[in-house]
Amino acid sequence: MDQTVKKKDCCSSKEVSGDQYDLIVVGAGSAGFSASITAAEAGKRVALVGHGTIGGTCVNVGCVPSKAMIRAAEAVHGGASAARFPGISPCAHAVDWGGVVKGTADLVEEMRQKKYIDLLPAYENVTYIEEGPARLVEGGVAVGGRVISAPRVLIAAGSRPHIPVIDGIEAVEALDSWGLLTLPDRPESILVLGGGYIGCELAQMASRLGVKVTLVTRSRLLPGAEPEVTEALTEALKVEGITVETGLAYVSVAKAAGGVSLTVERGGKTEDLTAERLVVTTGRIANSENLGLEELGIETDARGSVMVGPDMATTRAGVWAAGDVTDRDQFVYMAAYGAKVAINNALGLEQMRYDNAAMPWVVFTDPQVAGVGLSEAEAKTAGYDVKTSVITLDNVPRAAAARDTHGVIKLVADVKTDRLLGGQIAAPEGSETIQTLAMTLRFGMTAGALGETIFPYLTTVEGLKLAAQTFDKDVAKLSCCAG
């Protein structure tokens, strides 16, 4: 980094010092890189200030390592579950937990290098600065004992695991999601605290790799999902031997013989759940402390998330925010999208507004759970006169052929217009199927139009057509491909 030599600004004829930029981005994860690349491609000079490990949550401690180990667990489970097919005998795979962890760490390092570190030289207008904690100040950002200046700042500092307030939890060396994914030796048993996306994914992954798992949550699994979808996933996890404990209150945590004990309250009575290790997956919290936000009048919500408008602007002129540090959706693709929205508005390139109306989401369990748009409850709250369609996977020929009918599809539509408002699916290929439904919402299709669309036979996505037809008819009474 050149901090002294003056050079021509890439976007104007004025001279700027090495510490003056068109844009400062705080955070070098998905949102930070998306913002920096968008600005650099527009010819702007960008200071990308590191905030934690380059690459952020997704590649380092989130999506990449978790999905790699989930895939490994799927391979193990595939051998054991092969007996569902007539004429096929099951086989048991030996699991080297340490080897899986080591291979996952190698993949993370490879992807961090390829998709982040190696990208920087390709953008001459982006200067990467990693000199310690950053703090927003008047006119720029203070980092490494100096102030770098820019008329625009984007906060993309990400998030970290949230540890709930439970008596005694500090004394038991609780693992967060990354702690489990990097644990060198396989534990005999774990208590997974939290039944959201991360808790469900990691509970099943660990179970398939030979760990005895108890999944504990205050409400039901995936509380934001449709009840029918939650029920299908809960049953599937129980079939695999995972103990699912829902509707509990956490009382205290303590060390116990051979591990840890969690005291819970159920129906007014307390009981103890025990395991070798405790894994906490109770959500994430924004990395907004010590950034100087309050001093600059940048408002945060009760959880510390930076509040932004539809243009991703904060309550401070000249400051935008994107990604997990904000009060918006905590998905890596939405972080990158939000950053693009912010930079386009900040630089006056194209007026954009954050739009998640057709945002698909996925939980990488088996069956995979995915959704897009409004749930039935959300649609009613929004004032729609709602109609719904629900079919179980035993009505989908693909599932019957695969001998795996655990799952369900639910669609929500407006009674008056027949326009689809949302839908959710629990199915082995749910993550791939949901994008088709996202496109139907994106372009305002009706349930009738979806039901008349031609789909290839023996595919999971054909289930969307069958679900759409179920609004008006009993698909169990149709022949193959009829209708």
Image: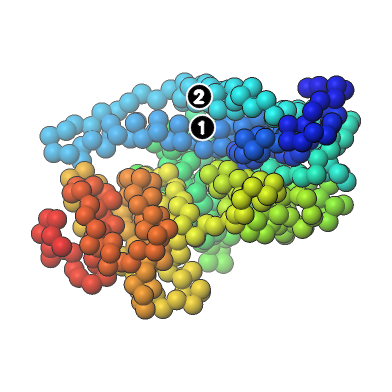
Q: Which residue is mark 2?
A: 107
Residue 171 visible in the current orientation: no
Nearer to us in this view, 169 or 377: 377
Q: Which residue is mark 1?
A: 65
Q: Residue at x 26, y 37 (%)?
A: 81
Q: Residue at x 41, y 52 (%)?
A: 370
x then y, percent, for residue 449: 28, 64
Contact, mark 1 vs mark 2 (Cβ under 8 Å): yes
x then y, percent, for residue 306: 71, 53
Helix, strand or loop for disc 2:
helix
Q: Is residue 122 above or below residue 280?
A: above
x then y, percent, for residue 221: 47, 56
Helix, strand or loop for disc 1:
helix
Q: Quadrant of residue 44?
A: top right
Q: Is residue 67 above or below residue 218?
A: above
Q: Residue at x 83, y 56 (%)?
A: 297
Which corner quadrant holds the N terminus? top right
| Colouring method of the image | rainbow
Q: Is residue 81 above or below residue 472?
A: above
Specify the amino acid type for callout 1: Pro
